[in-house]
Amino acid sequence: MTTVLDEKTIEEMAKAGVIYGHKRSKTHPQMKPYIAGQKNEFELIDPQATQDALAKAIEFLKEKVKIGGSVEKGLMLLVGTLPAAKTLIGDFAREFKFPYVTNRWLGGTLTNFKVINDRRVYYENLKNQKEKGLLSKYTKKEQLEFSREIDKLSQNFEGLHELTKIPDAIFVVDIKEHETAVREAKRTNVPIVAIVDTDDEVTQVEYPIFANDHARSSIEWVIEKIKAGVKQ
């Protein structure tokens, strides 16, 4: 059911920069139905289209990703490595205990899951051994080498602690920046929820949310709506 937006919500979206896309020259043809107009050469996303897409994405996530309760929840992998998104993605993930990628996407995270998972387990075991003082039996030089290895591995695997299986969904901020993640999700049949801007190819995503994907305030607005929606 479509919820007609009121003026207050539209103003809220405009203030957060949600409806401001890229310049008209960069518009992807697939996004034209979701554009309401232009302002100073920049495309304006239709707020109603954003609202409808957001509602559809939230309904999917409420069904696919169980939040709380006694039922084992589905896993959603959150991906956002650009400065505007990474802190928001990390906070979102930690609040719901979801795996996340905020540094860089490791090729094969989904398509070569076993190898990536083995490396994750190795990192966590090594980290636990250090925390428990079990590496003290090695020489100082060897301990230093282990510490350096842990620091290096943490950049890629710290956010993947919860990724114990192929995720049930993936949430992406900026699909052009994370085309490898999107490609791997499609190859492994993992549904994609993503913030889709005016320069993006809509058909790459099962559940697009039409919004500015490069402004922190816009990304935060979308994430807060998703968080509130899935908790209901």
Image: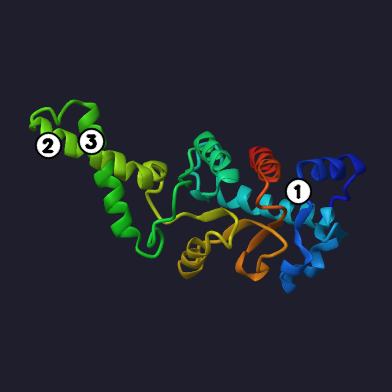
What quarter of the picture does the N terminus occupy?
bottom right
Q: Nearer the viewer, mark 1 or mark 2?
A: 2
Residue under the image location 32 percent in, 55 percent down: 116
The tag on residue 51 is none
Q: Is residue 166 left or right of residue 168?
A: left
State the residue position of label 2: 142
Query: Mark 2 is on which residue type?
Result: Glu
Residue 119: image x %, image y %?
Answer: 27, 51
Q: Are marks 1 and 2 in contact (CB under 8 Å)?
A: no
* Disc 3 crowd, CA 10 A, few/some/many (<14, 14-19, 20+): some
**Image-quadrant location for residue 14:** top right
Residue under the image location 34 percent in, 63 percent down: 112
Residue 125, can we see it? no
State the residue position of label 3: 147
* Disc 1 crowd, CA 10 A, few/some/many (<14, 14-19, 20+): many
For residue 12, above or below residue 19? above
